[in-house]
Amino acid sequence: MDAWDDLRSSPKLGLALGGGGALGAAHVGVLQVLHERGLTPTVIAGTSAGSIMGGAYAIGLDPYDLEERTVRAGWGTFGSFSAKPGLGLLTADALRETVHRVAGDAVIEDLPVTFAAVATDVETREAVVLKSGSLADAIAASIAVPGIFRPVRVNGRMLIDGGVVQNLPVETAFELGADHVIAVRLAPEWDGMGVEHTALQVHEWVIHPDVTLIRPVLEHRSQWMPRDLPGMIELGRQAAERALADYPVVHERPPRPEPITPPEDEEMPEQPRGIARFLHRH
C-alpha cells in the first residue's frame, strides 16, 4: 500500500453511515473493524439508523459496548407509542431518553469529532444537515420514518427521516470537510417514489476515487423486524474486513463474552405506506 493511500494517516477521514432500520446493526460490526484496523474517522455523517450508530461513535462509545446495547435493543428503545392523534404511531421520546442515559444533554458542536445527522424538511423535501444543537433532537429527526414516527420540530422546521432524500450521506460527509469517505450502504435508496436524490446520484458518489464503499450482504433481512441482530453485526464485520483487507489488525478483537440473549422478535408497526402518501401528496 502506497503511503499516500494509507487512510490511517488521513487527518480528515470521513464516515458516512446509511439508513436501513434494523439493518443498522451491521454498522456496529463496521465500527469494530475500523477500530481493529486503526482507522479513526474524524468526520461522521449519519442518516436514520446511521445517525444512531454515528452518534454513538461520535460520543466515544466503545464499539463492543455498542454491540451489547444493540443486541438488547428493541423498537421500544427508540419509539414511544402515543394514543393521541398525530402524523405517526410513535414519538421519539424513548430515543431521547436513551440518548440522555448514554450521553447526557450532549450538544453536537461539543463532540470530539465532527458529526451531522441528515433529516428531511417536510415542507420543502430538502435535506437538512443537523450539525449543531441537541444530539438527541438531531437523531430523533433523522429516524422519523413517515407514518411510523411523528415529525420532529428542530429550529422551527418540521423534519422527518433523512432517508427520504439522502439515505447514504456521502455528500454531507464531504461537505463537513472529509478528504476521503468510508461509506456504509445498507439498503437501496427509495427510488420510484417521487424522490429526486435517487440511487443514480448515490452511485455517482460511491464510485468517486475518494470513497471506500462497504456494503454488507443483508438480503432477505427486513428493515422493520430486528431479528438476528448478532448475525447482522457479523455481516457488517465481514463486509468491512473485505473492503479493508489491506490494513493489518493493530487492535485485537477482545474475547467474546457469553452470547447475549436478544429480546423476543419485535416487529415494527406495519411498513409505512405513509411514506408514499407524503411523497405524492401534491
Image: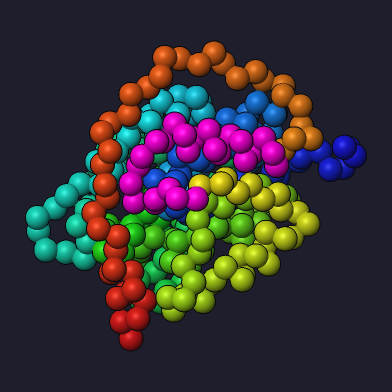
Identify the main secondary structure in magenta. Answer: helix
Say which quarter of the image contains residue 197.
bottom right
Question: Looking at this view, is 89 or 12 the one in front?
Answer: 89
Residue at image location 61% in from the left, 57% down from the top: 170
Residue extending furthest bottom?
Answer: 282
Q: Specify whether 235 is left or right of 213.
A: left
Q: How is the image coloured?
A: rainbow
Q: Position of residue 275 (x, y in %)?
A: 33, 69
Q: Position of residue 127 (x, y in %)?
A: 48, 67
Query: Quick check: can you spot residue 55?
Result: no
Work out which quarter of the rendered image holds the C terminus and state it: bottom left
Residue at image location 28% in from the left, 31% down from the top: 263
Q: Is residue 277 above or below residue 42?
A: below
Say which quarter of the image contains residue 97.
top left
Q: Is residue 193 above or below residue 14?
A: below
Q: Is residue 166 magenta?
A: no
Q: Give the range drawn in magenta.
A: 219-243
Q: In this view, does 247 lie above or below 182?
A: above
Query: Quick check: can you spot residue 18?
Result: yes
Q: Does the magenta stretch include residue 236?
A: yes
